[in-house]
Amino acid sequence: MLDPSNAGLAQFSAGDTPPEAVMPVFLAMTWAGSQSGQRANRCVDACRTLGYALGEIGVVTELRATEVIVHDRRTGAMTRCAPEMPTWRDVEPLPELNGHCILTLPEQGRWIDATIEQFPGVRGGPAVGRCGGIVDPRTGAVMAGDALGPRLPQGAHVAIGRGHLMLLYTLSPDEASARITGHHMIRHTAEEHRRTGLNLLSVVLARAGESAHLAALLRTTPHPRLHALLDALAGTSLRRAANGDALFDLGDGHAVRLDEFDLPADTPSPVTPA
């Protein structure tokens, strides 16, 4: 289970973050703050874990494969860090992905790259970007990000700057994303990622129970299911189960996971990440 005192929780400040982006930013920072090392397939773990965490509060997400090119604006060098079409290498103990993926939030026009720092020279923590002006791959015209509809088409370009580096993402064909989500290892670890996502969200909500400022901030978000969970968690405390699950003590000798709370009948249902 994630450590409630990790750096992501300690360093988060809403600043000018729009209400709908608070949870994507907060969860991405918390996830990144709990990680160490540079595991293979880390981007897939991040997308799946964050997808289930956001899905539990009703946010629609989709894992998308993407080509990544890093442009050094000081030297002009262009480095291709991830190919358009990902492949898997059958190695022990687990298959390794040669490629990269990001998590898109179609209803918000946003995207998350929680593992952006795996690329050489890139610092500054996870990226949560918004699709502003982008190039329509079907026509070549520059358009507002929301003009292409709720889901960015394959071939769409997004970019983010980090110091003297510019990261250029080109969304791969849907077949490429299916190579990742359809791989037997990813299918077989779906429940593990779901539970990890619940643990991630549980740590964030437990901290909100200890901080009036954070609780008030989360109440500004446009997520009715999140608000219902905050109500349900009032007066509970977080502990770790023997299997690593985050459990909330109800004060009567019982403890439950976040997805086991009884919420009002009109509470929106969670959504499964695509």
Image: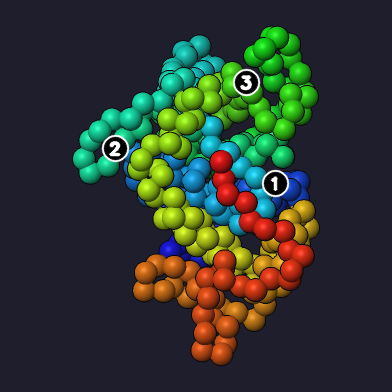
In front of the other: label 1 or label 2?
2
Q: Residue at x 69, y 20 (%)?
A: 134
Tell me whether circle 3 and circle 1 mark residues in contact (CB < 8 Å).
no
Residue 169: percent from left, percent from top: 55, 24
Q: Quadrant of residue 106?
A: top right
10 Å crowding of disc 1: few (<14), some (14-19), many (20+)? some
Q: Which residue is mark 3?
A: 156
Judged from this view, the residue extending furthest toward the left is: 92
Q: CA distance from mark 1 to mark 2?
A: 33 Å
Please identify the quadrant where the N terminus is shown.
bottom left
Label 2 vs 3, first from the N-terminus: 2
Q: Residue at x 33, y 30 (%)?
A: 88
> Residue type at mark 1?
Ala
Q: Secondary structure at mark 1?
A: helix
Judged from this view, the residue extending furthest toward the top is: 140
Q: Secondary structure at mark 3?
A: loop
> Residue type at mark 2?
Pro
> Residue type at mark 3?
Ala
Q: Which residue is mark 2?
A: 95
Which of the labelled discs sits on residue 43, or is there none? none
- Pick whichever, 36 or 274, lies toward us: 274
Which of the labelled discs sits on residue 21, or is there none? 1
Above-or-below relation of 236 to 227: below
Residue 141: percent from left, percent from top: 73, 11
